[in-house]
Image (cartoon, rainbow, N blue to C red):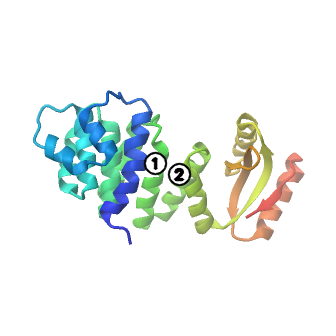
Amino acid sequence: MLSVQQKFLSILVAVTLLAWLWEGIAWNAEDIESLVLKGAFRGAIQTYGDCNTLTANEYYFLAVCYLEIGDLKSAETILQRLLSSSEKERSLLTLAQLKNAEGSFSESEKFFRQFISEFPKSPHQPAGLFGLSEVLFQKKSTTEGVEILRRLRRNYPLSSEAEKSIEVLNRELGPFAVQVGAFSEMARAEKVRDDLIAKGYDAYIVRSAETSLIYRVRFGNFKDGKKAESVGQALKAATGLDFRVVR
């Protein structure tokens, strides 16, 4: 089983560090940022840990350093302070992930919900939604957890979290789905998906890379392939859409 520190190594490198840097955060080659990107976390703490003139951005990177060495208490203290700063968005998400890794699921849920509500246009909404679903499953709130994953799968089809959501939903609800089209253009796939949603189907897009990018439109989760076939036949009779059952 991964330790808390190991969990955060993947979370912070993949989500709260490099992604944030490349998505518009000012990059001025500041010393603490350079140290973090080099993995010199203890050196950054030794140099900046007692400094009281850091910017909010620099304090966030200091929190990253504490997380990476496993000092969650110091990291949380900084992140809590940053909730009233310009770094509120990513501090909320990181606090939610921290509390989830600690097993403090009620606190984690609170932070995830706050992040999702206050930053609906954040590029990290998929991470927030998937994290919230994990917490809900831990708290045995399976029905809401499933609905969150459906929302994620439907609204953020190109995210890595959507791929993980499909895996979880297949396990929870059944591995069979009805596929009604495969398109080379995302816009065409979105139109078919939206038409199906308007008809009441739990439709979503799956991206796959073969010789080129293909966007497949599917709906539903079925435990039984025969049930999926029956629903597909009913759709074809009503709309004329061809289909196939996939797993």
Q: Is residue 149 above or below residue 18?
A: below
Rendered-image quadrant of the C terminus: bottom right
Compared to residue 142, the image places residue 91 above or below, namely above
Residue 83 can be seen in this image: no
Q: Which residue is mark 2?
A: 161
Amino acid beneath label 2: Glu
Q: Secondary structure at mark 1?
A: helix
Q: Are marks 1 and 2 in contact (CB under 8 Å)?
A: yes
Residue 144 at x, y percent in the picture: 49, 58
Residue 73 in the figure: left or right of residue 242: left
Q: Which residue is mark 1?
A: 127
User: 236 or 52: which is nearer to us?
Assistant: 52
Relative image position of residue 125 (x, y in whole percent): 47, 42
Residue closer to the observer: 194 or 41: 41
Residue 208 in the image: state x and y as whole percent: 70, 50
Q: Earlier in the sequence, mark 1 or mark 2?
A: 1
Point 82% across, 64% down: residue: 229
**Which corner quadrant holds the N terminus?**
bottom left
